[in-house]
Amino acid sequence: MIQSLTTDLLSAVNHYLSERLGLYFNEMRYSDLERGLNNAAQELGYANAEHCINEILEGALNKQDLQTVVRNLTVGETYFFRDQAVFIAMEEKIIPELLKRKRKSGNKALRIWSAGCSTGEEPYSIAISLSRTIPDIDSWQIHLIATDINTRSLEKAHNASYGSWSFRTMPSEFFHQYFQPSAEGQHKLNDNLRKYVKLSYLNLAEDEYPTSKSGTSEMDIVFCRNVLIYFTQQRGKQIADKLADCLAPGGSFITSASDSSRFITQPPKGLQRVGSTIFVKSNAEK
């Protein structure tokens, strides 16, 4: 049953989710929080959302049920080559300069992380850009990890099959070159690109990184776009600083316009702004 929730109840569960998972909804987004909680309650079989919230606040939900709540609260919109200016910068400047530096040192390995990858359009867009920019890509070690807190989104990313809405800004030549028709009007990414992306669960608010175990250390590029908006200002800054620690010298941190606005006066730790949404770690190897 769809239930209208009180501001006090929404505030209480919002505080819990912020502390436990890092998910935060300001009051302007309480309607999104309410809708997500109603959907989660219905999916979990509760009579109403208030009962579900009380169970959340008491810590009575198991990990699987809590994931159901997360899935309903983090339904992010994404599509291939979202913010094309970022991918132009990738192909024309960031990747060529990175390749030049790597070749000079004899290190033919690239380490890239898509943090908060949702249903996979972002990391697969990165894979396409790499294939377009690196003529001898098969001779390189590509370590492209993609993580998210939403397990259902990760399942879709694993499948790598998408409908027309995901391609709405993709150049048509990319669409025909990198995708093949699959069932029911879907198109599936070619296996020779899927192989570069390693998908896994990671909670930016709780899990440890950088670590060698999670493969998140010494990254050449970290993408974290339209993710920090889910956190409080303080928690978002802490997460951005941790992601900055994941970068190798000279590495790039790429965010979105909505996230980047948090760093107008103070960039993430040890980073310098080089574009509206791009930051670079200092002390690059010459």
Image: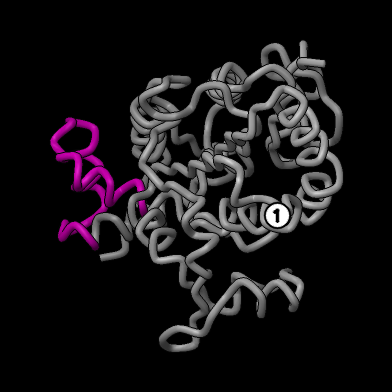
| For residue 251, above or below residue 36 | above
Foreground of the two, 106 or 33: 106
The reply to whether the magenta stretch includes residue 153 is no
| For residue 286, above or below residue 277 | above
Residue 19 image offset from top left, x and y in percent: 38, 24
Q: Quadrant of the C terminus?
A: top right
Q: Secondary structure at mark 1?
A: helix
- Drawn side of residue 43 relative to residue 73, left or right: left
Q: What residue is at 48 percent from the left and 66 percent from the top?
A: 191
Residue 224 image offset from top left, x and y in percent: 60, 37
The amino acid pointed to by label 1 is: Ser
Residue 105 image offset from top left, x and y in percent: 72, 22
Residue 31 is at least partly visible in this image: no
Foreground of the two, 23 or 198: 198
| For residue 231, above or below residue 38 | above
- Drawn side of residue 212 relative to residue 93, left or right: left
Q: What residue is at 82 percent from the left and 52 percent from the top?
A: 88
Q: How is the image coloured?
A: one colour
Q: Quadrant of residue 80?
A: bottom right
Q: What residue is at 15 percent from the left and 60 percent from the top?
A: 45
- Drawn side of residue 241 relative to residue 43, left or right: right
Q: Quadrant of residue 284?
A: top right
Residue count near mark 1 (Cα–Cα under 10 Å), binned few <14, some 14–19, many ≥20: some
Residue 141 image offset from top left, x and y in percent: 55, 40
The reply to whether the magenta stretch includes residue 60 is yes
Q: What residue is at 17 percent from the left and 31 percent from the top?
A: 58
Q: Quadrant of the N terminus?
A: bottom left
| Number of disc labels | 1
**Residue matched to label 1:** 129
What range of the chain is rendered magenta? Answer: 43-71
Foreground of the two, 246 or 226: 246
